[in-house]
Amino acid sequence: MPVDLACPSCGRTYPAGADEPWRCVCGSPLEFDASTGLDRPRPDPTDVDARRGLWAFEELLSVSSTASLGEGFTPLVDAPEWNAGFKLEYVFPTGSFKDRGATTLLSRAAALDVSRVLEDSSGNAGAAIATYAARAGIDAEIYVPAGAKASKLAMIERTGARAVRVEGSREAVTEACVEAVERGEGWYASHAWSPAFFAGTQTVAFEIAAQRDWEVPDAVVIPLGHGTLFLGAYRGFRTLHEAGWIDSLPRLLGAQASGFAPIAESLHGPTVEENELADGVRIREPVREGEIAEAIEETDGDAIAVPAADTERELDRLHRAGFFVEPTSALAPAALREYRASGILDADADVVVPLTGSGLKATWS
């Protein structure tokens, strides 16, 4: 049976069901009303069945696999030019890490007998939700910016989902989608609000730890918009640490786009230029901003803003090194250079960087 929902802010609980709310009446995001703690010794890494993809960790997810395309256990490879390990999140079925959350979110929707889902997205999350909705046999409607990349719109529409183009800011896209949800037009499959999405994104931490024989890196540098991968990593590493499977938490270091960097600006002051190149993280009001701040504080982390010029230079370096990613993926390697140059990270620090989206989804001139 699907687990119930609870509000960590006010304590209200909500029974699982197709009519469950997408947020608490107090305005806070909801979480699963269930423990995902581990009560057994950590397995030998060779005993983790990577053939099941991220569902090798199903016991930790509070969701059962229903809508799956074999996602997860993406490669972790050496990147000598960056003196780091790159986690190749762009090799997922839809070409982005958002599949981690989409498989768990649509699996929950299927378990609740949801017939129609609505989502708002700049592209990658929408493509993932539409694809996994198709896998689950659920209708989908995806609200996107009017200027969303044609390749991402095509992915959405080829699944049979309807793409609703909205003029204005990314925030306007969310507002239009929420209004439709509140009119009763569908179940809100939100990658920013749903705990089921974060159940999936935390598996990035489980995989990194298992692939490194339960030895975590000194730091993980992650693109940061709504924080779905950043917070997923935090939740996953924290779960493993509390269970004694890992000895410490890695520092979590965020990479935001200049001009769309509320977390970095709260730490380091305002930015001026708008980095339009990194379209995947142009979020000015993250739903879980308080949680992101907590993750940074608890891991001795940080967040910095990356301008467009640095993003473009790093993108070129990545492509010439064989990593064909979309522009948003270049934020984290660019930020890694800055973190080392500023002394926040030692030159020889052991670092993992997720590369989050495929260059096959971008439009190139």
Image (spheres, helix red, strand yellow):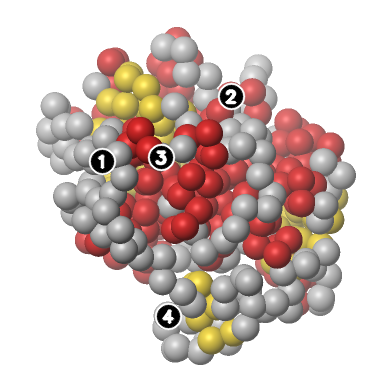
* 57 relative to 113, above or below: above
- Badge 1 element: loop
Report x, y in % for residue 122.
Answer: 64, 47
Q: Amino acid at mark 1?
A: Trp
SS at badge 4: loop
Q: Which residue is mark 4?
A: 8
Query: Alpha carbon of mark 1 to alpha carbon of mark 2: how far?
Result: 31 Å
| Mark positioned earlier in the residue sequence (1 or 3) | 3
Q: Tag 2 or tag 1, which sits nearer the N-term?
A: 1
Q: Nearer the viewer, mark 4 or mark 2?
A: 4
Residue at x 54% of width, y 39% of height:
52
| On screen, residue 222 above or below 30 | above
Viewer-closest of 202 and 58: 58
Q: Earlier in the sequence, mark 3 or mark 2?
A: 3
Dot 3 falls on a residue whose secondary structure is loop
Lower position in the chain sequence, tag 3 or tag 4:
4
From the image, state whether disc 1 or disc 4 is nearer to you: 1
Q: Nearer the viewer, mark 1 or mark 3?
A: 3
- Kind of residue at badge 2: Gly
Residue depicted at x 56% and y 57%: 197
Q: Amino acid at mark 3?
A: Val
* Disc 3/disc 2 C-alpha distance (Å): 30 Å
User: Label 1 belongs to which residue?
Assistant: 214
Residue 273, picture quadrant: top left
Work out whether residue 91 or residue 82 is closer to the camera in this orientation and state it: 91
Label at residue 359? 2
Which mark is nearer the camera, 3 or 4? 3
Which label sits on residue 48?
3
Q: Earlier in the sequence, mark 4 or mark 2?
A: 4
Q: The N terminus appears in which quarter of the rendering?
A: bottom right
